[in-house]
Amino acid sequence: MVVDISQNPTEIKSAIQKFATEFAASASENDLVEVKIVGKDEKPIGKKDFFSGVGVTVPDSVLMKLSEDYSLFARKESGSVRLGFVFKTVTSSGLADEMKNWEPTLETDLAPLYIEQATAGTGTFSSSQYKNADIRYFNFSSPTDTSLDYSVISNFLVIGSSKDTTRAILDYMSQK
C-alpha cells in the first residue's frame, strides 16, 4: 500500500480505511491479507510515522523494543474487516511485562484499530494459549466477536482486533 504522508501523516489512516472498505467488498469470508505500508518513494514508512498516522499511542518503553519491520493485517470476519499488526522486535526481553504495564490504557490507545466501529465493554485482560503462543486478551461486549489480543512470541509482537484474526495471523506467521 503506497501512502503519501508528505503533507499529512493521517493519510495512513485514510488509506487503511479505504483499503478495508474495498477488502470487505471483495474478499471471501476468513480471507487474511498482509499489507506493507510504503511511502510514495516505495520505502517503508517508519513505525513512529505509522503509529501517529493511524492515531495510535504507544508507550516509549514498548516503542523502543520494536523494529521498523512491521506488517498490517486485514481479515474478513462476519462481513466486517478486523485489523491486526505484527512488529518484529529489536529485543523481546521484557516486552511482555511492558505490554502488561500498558494494559490499563491499551484499549483506548489502540482504538483506531477498530475501523469505524465503536467498541464497548469493561473488564480486565485475561490469558490464554493458542498453539505455542501465550495470548493476553480483552473481549468487548460490542461489536460481536471483537477483542483486543496480543502476543509476544519469538521476536515478534502480534496485536489483533479479534481472537480469530490474531490466531489467523499466528498461523500465517508459523508458515513463513
Image (tube, helix red, strand yellow):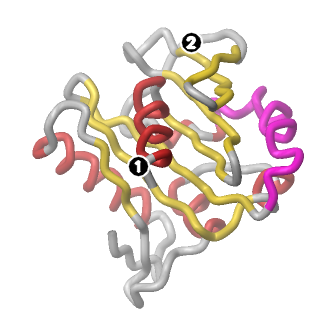
The image position of residue 12, as x and y in percent, is 43, 64
- 148 left or right of 63? left
Displayed quadrant of residue 168: top left
Which mark lies nearer to you, 1 or 2? Answer: 1
Question: Badge 2 is on which residue?
Answer: 121
In this view, the residue in front, 94 or 144, is 94
Q: Which residue lies at the image location 70% right of the left edge and 54% below the top edge?
A: 155
Which residue was labeled with disc 1? 73
In the rendering, at what x and y percent does residue 50 appear?
A: 55, 64
Query: Which amino acid, mark 1?
Result: Phe
- Circles 1, 2 touching at the beta carbon (< 8 Å): no
Q: Secondary structure at mark 2?
A: loop
Dot 1 or dot 2, earlier in sequence: 1
Q: Residue furthest left?
A: 26
**How much space separates mark 1 and mark 2, taking CA atoms?**
24 Å
Report the quarter where the N terminus lies.
bottom left
Magenta part of the protein: which range? 91-108
The quadrant the C terminus occupies is: bottom left
Question: Dominant secondary structure of the magenta stretch?
Answer: helix
Left or right? Give the position of 42 relative to 148: left
Q: How many marks?
A: 2
Between 52 and 164, which is closer to the camera in this rendering?
A: 164
